[in-house]
Amino acid sequence: MKSFERIGLVAATCLAAALTAVPARAASPVTVYASPTGSGTACTSSAPCSLTGARALVETMNRSMTVNIDVDLYGGVYRLPSTFQLGPADSGSNGYQVVWQAVGGQVPVFSGADQVTGFTQYNAGLNIWRAPVTAAQAATGGRQLFVDGQRAQLARSAGTPAGLSVTSTGFFTTDASYASFTGQSRIDVVDDNDWKHESCPVASITPASGGANINILSSCWNANHTNVPNPNFPFNGNGLPAMSGISYVQNAYQLLTQPGQFYLDTAGDYLYYIPRAGQNMATADVELPLLQSLVTLQGTPGHLTPVNQNAPGTAYSGSGWFLSSGRSLGDFGDDVEATQANGGSVSYSFTGTGLEVLAETYSDEGTFTVTVDGKPDTSQPWTENSSGSTRLAQQVVYAVQGLSQGSHTVTLTKTGGMYLTVDGFEATPTPIAPVHDITFSGVTFTGTTWNTPQTAGYLDNQAGVLWDPTVTPIAPVLVPAAVTVSRGTNITFSGDVFQHLGATAVALADGTQNSAVTGSTITDTAGGGISVGNVDDYFQTNTTLMTSGDTLSDNEISFVGQNYSDTVGIFAGYTRALAITHNDIGYTPYSGISLGWGWGWQSDCSLQARQGLSVCRHGTDYAEGNQITDNYIHDVMGVLYDGGPIYTNGGQGLGTGVPSGPCQQYSTVSGNVVADGNHTNNMLYHDEGSSCWNTYDNVTEFGGSDWVGMWTPTINTIDIHDNYSDNASYNDNGTNITFNQATIATGGAWPTAARTLMSQAGVPAQYAPATGRIDDASLAIGYTGAWFDSGFRGYGDYDDDVHATTNNGDSATVTFYGTGITYYSETYSDEGVIGVTLDGTAEPNINASTSTRQVQQALYTVSGLNLGLHTLILTKQSGTYMLVDRFDIR
């Protein structure tokens, strides 16, 4: 949201900097050109290449760079037949970048969609139109559709089917018409329940006495209802809630009833759609996404996952080895192999360049020697030691990297102590070679789908982290992204647009380091906005394999989670030195920012016992030094519950997990303004296991039962101080919490320090979109009195939210730079007279009372003012409510 009061200050600052410091002119880059219709190998401005042609030319030029290589992209739609892949061979060198950028003033669009034409009216009564599609389009598409730049909704029921009850195979409904639905194997049922979004494909719908049985795909029903995964720390804090109802049924032709809905018939190869008002199907731009991934930047080794201690390639020798399973101590796969006999050995054979061995450390563990391919590992101490005073599960007790690519065998042999315990192995299959020094600037990424929920269901854990049902032991997996960086270094996305996507927008994954998403716009995604890191590499001790040093700054993130309502604006798993700063995040179905994972995993056993846990699963993670600063987060939690604008989970910075600290390095939540919480219980939410946070200089307003929440003893070693709120309620049940109550403001009378924070949070003016439209949630609007936010109303408000008050005398003030302004709001029988003052002069009153509800009505407009700063004040005078929806500035 643009703050007009900041524009003049920023401009003056930039001018002063320009006058006082004129940098030396950089050497001109080498330029390669590409266009949507490009071909050949010249890649010049007059004979541009295709994307793949430009990539091939770059690969001949980038070995010994002395300047940047710019790949200038002409505007237009690049319809990708497959994922565009970049790797180490496409990277910059000698510290220079390969920059894929828009030609000045043009908009290159990377699209994974096909355009569909040839619509004719099929059902006049419902105004259903249809167009033929190819068999390939029908087989690949069907989850997403965008018409004239607007998301269409997969045909769905208006809500819960009538008379719903749970059966052993799914659900029963008293609505017998469901049994006549066609294409039953493509139908989904969806349950939005507490903090989870769960969906399952339908196996069949059969007639039943008094209605119909909706029988769910058995594997999905098991995972979402009967046997919900609950491996506990560090993967999950609570297996529940299970799928226990239906919020809506989707993807059946018989549910196609409302404007803006669509259905893809894979048997008949037709796309059906009901136009919205004003849409002309003869000229409409109808985009059917087919690709899941638009761009991948892939280094090696990619994603790493451990295997259990009895995986193929493992051999145990010597006496005394035994399997200990079901220990409930946090072991990988909940079991270990152990021996008490000195001389007992374990060998693991693998193909790759490195290995990490996971085991328990404890006072009864001892020493062992290591050989690699039959030779002692002389790069490390002759004798290794897994002894420790505190029992810690899944610790890296031995690691080797940098081996030649090929087959290797690592052998551990017990030499002392009571036990040698083995829990798992993680091999590095290829050399560590990041993709690096690549920038995308000014590019729009759009038109993706994601079909896994159609075939396997959506097996939710939390915040877009799902369960992968194909692996044993069960493991977490993140919602995929349209643009993914894996093992990247110095990768930058600057001034890009990510919109109309079928899953998450962009992911910095698998140990990506020193990379950034900055000054970009992310909107209208089925999944999340940005994800960083992973949730299954907590044990990592090798800093080259950690996710660290990344930056997410100055981004506008809105309307994510349009299909998968558990996803969030920014998600980060295990990360180090991640900076999330000066972003504007709003209109999310769940949390705004979710950082951290593992719940009470890093909290020691005494804290877990105080929480009431009967067993202790305790280990370490590498997360520390993360920064959530100066963001504006608003209008969140529109669908689900038990989250917040800023949500943290699991340990930061302790390393050993000792509850009294000291923290090795604090993480920070500061300078943020969080508002309009909807279903939020905590505006600043330090959830289970959160530790080593310094939370200060934040402003919370309009929402949440508590301005800050720490509900259980495993939340520990956190400093809360110098915050501001319009709500005095808080929840402090953590351990070793330094808590100072916020300064409480009433009636919009914020202290000067809080107003300063509000003027500095969010996207700086130089990155704000060039528009004069501001929503009611904008920090450019000052509310005085007992105002509250009403979001996700579903009435057609601008951005689906309004601010409202019931008190006469309450006012809304907006100071703007321009020549005119229009105030839009709702009119209805429960609204009344609004007083207007412009630049200190009273204007005629507004009467917002009408017999029927009408939204986005222009209630006051003025134009022809002198170009400059002006102040408009609106004051409630009568009626039950006064609402503010938006302002348009000219």
Image: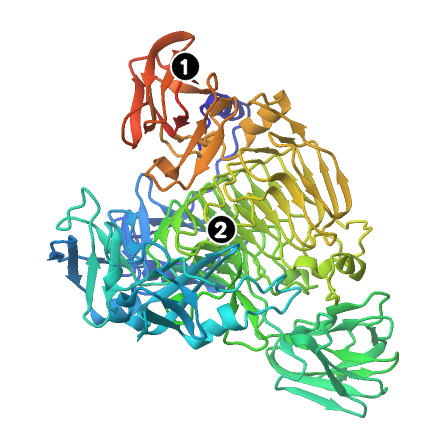
Asked if 486 appears above or below 848 in the picture, the reply is: below
Secondary element at tag 2: loop
Q: From this viewpoint, which residue is outermost toward the front? A: 210
Q: Is residue 425 left or right of residue 830?
A: right
Residues 700 and 342: in front is 700
Give the quadrant of residue 309: bottom right
Quadrant of the rendering where the C terminus is positioned: top left
Colouring convention used in this rendered image of the protein: rainbow
Number of the front mark, 1 or 2: 2
Give the quadrant of residue 367: bottom right
Which residue shows up at 32% across the image and 48% down it?
108
- Determine which residue is flagged by label 2: 640
Q: From this viewpoint, which residue is outermost toward the top? A: 841
Which residue shows up at 66% across the image and 63% down it?
538
Q: Is residue 690 left or right of residue 449?
A: right
Q: Position of residue 299 (x, y in %)?
A: 52, 64
The residues tagged by marks 1 and 2 sit, at their Cα atoms, a distance apart of 40 Å
- Determine which residue is flagged by label 1: 870
Crowd rating for badge 1 (residues with CA inside 10 Å; few <14, some 14–19, many 20+): some
Quadrant of the rendering where the N terminus is positioned: top left
Q: Position of residue 627 (x, y in %)?
A: 63, 44
Amino acid type indicated by mark 2: Leu
* Lower sequence index among marks 1 and 2: 2
Amino acid type indicated by mark 1: His
Asked if 259 appears above or below 384 in the picture, the reply is: above
**Residue 769 image label:** none
Secondary element at tag 1: strand
Q: Position of residue 110 (x, y in %)?
A: 33, 54
Crowd rating for badge 2 (residues with CA inside 10 Å; few <14, some 14–19, many 20+): many
Residues 517 and 632: in front is 632
Q: Position of residue 644 (x, y in %)?
A: 56, 45
Which residue shows up at 67% across the image and 73% down it?
332
